[in-house]
Image: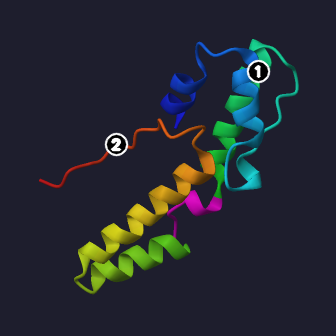
Amino acid sequence: MSKHYANTLNGKKISEGKLPLEQRNSISDARTPVEQVSQAGIHNAATARYSKFFGYLRNLFIGDSRENSSIQEHLDAGHPELAGQKLEEHVRHVKRAWAIDNSIEISRLDKE
């Protein structure tokens, strides 16, 4: 997410960075006000948004969180294809909720 924010915001006009930070996304938690209309203000808002992303409950796969439990149930039942489907749904949600635009690239770990 850090790389996405940097790649998306670097080189843009302040007005082009302010709007998506404040208004883009499907959840209100991700919308972060730019307090100072300047390069420093954009940087501060992007940093604050990045911090909120890592504290976002649906992003945390800890204990019995709904997403974690659901994916683990599919793995335990011998249906890894369903676990993969649930993971893809979660990734789509995170992209809608926290990405600044559609340019975000999600890295994948391949099983050996």
- Indicate the secondary structure of the residue bearing disc 1: helix
Instruction: Give the Cα separation between the discs numbered 1 and 2.
Output: 29 Å
Residue 36: x, y in percent?
87, 20
- Indicate the secondary structure of the residue bearing disc 2: loop
Residue 110: x, y in percent?
20, 50
Q: Is residue 74 above or below residue 59?
A: below
Q: Nearer the viewer, residue 84 or 47?
A: 84
Q: In this rendering, which labeled residue sits more in front, label 1 or label 2?
A: 1
In terms of sequence position, does the residue under pointer 1 or pointer 2 come before the other? 1
Residue 58 shown in magenta: yes
Instruction: Rate crowding at label 2 as few (under 14), some (14 to 19) or many (20 or more) other CA atoms within 10 Å.
Output: few
> In the shown orientation, is residue 38 left or right of residue 87?
right
Q: Amino acid type of disc 1?
A: Ser
* Quadrant of the rendered image containing residue 18: top right
Name the residue at the bottom extreme. Answer: 77
Q: Residue at x 67, y 48 (%)?
A: 25
Name the residue at the right extreme. Answer: 35
Q: What is the number of the mark on residue 92? A: none
Residue highlighted by disc 2: 107
Q: Is residue 92 above or below residue 72?
A: above
Q: Residue at x 77, y 53 (%)?
A: 28
Q: Is residue 85 in sight in this rendering?
A: yes
Q: Is residue 64 in sight in this rendering?
A: no
Q: Amino acid type of disc 2?
A: Ser
The magenta region covers: 57-63
Residue 14: x, y in percent?
74, 17
> In the shown orientation, is residue 29 left or right of residue 110?
right
Q: Nearer the viewer, residue 59 or 42?
A: 42
Instruction: Rate crowding at label 1 as few (under 14), some (14 to 19) or many (20 or more) other CA atoms within 10 Å.
Output: few
Residue 64 shown in magenta: no
Residue 3: x, y in percent?
49, 29
Q: What is the number of the mark on residue 15? A: 1
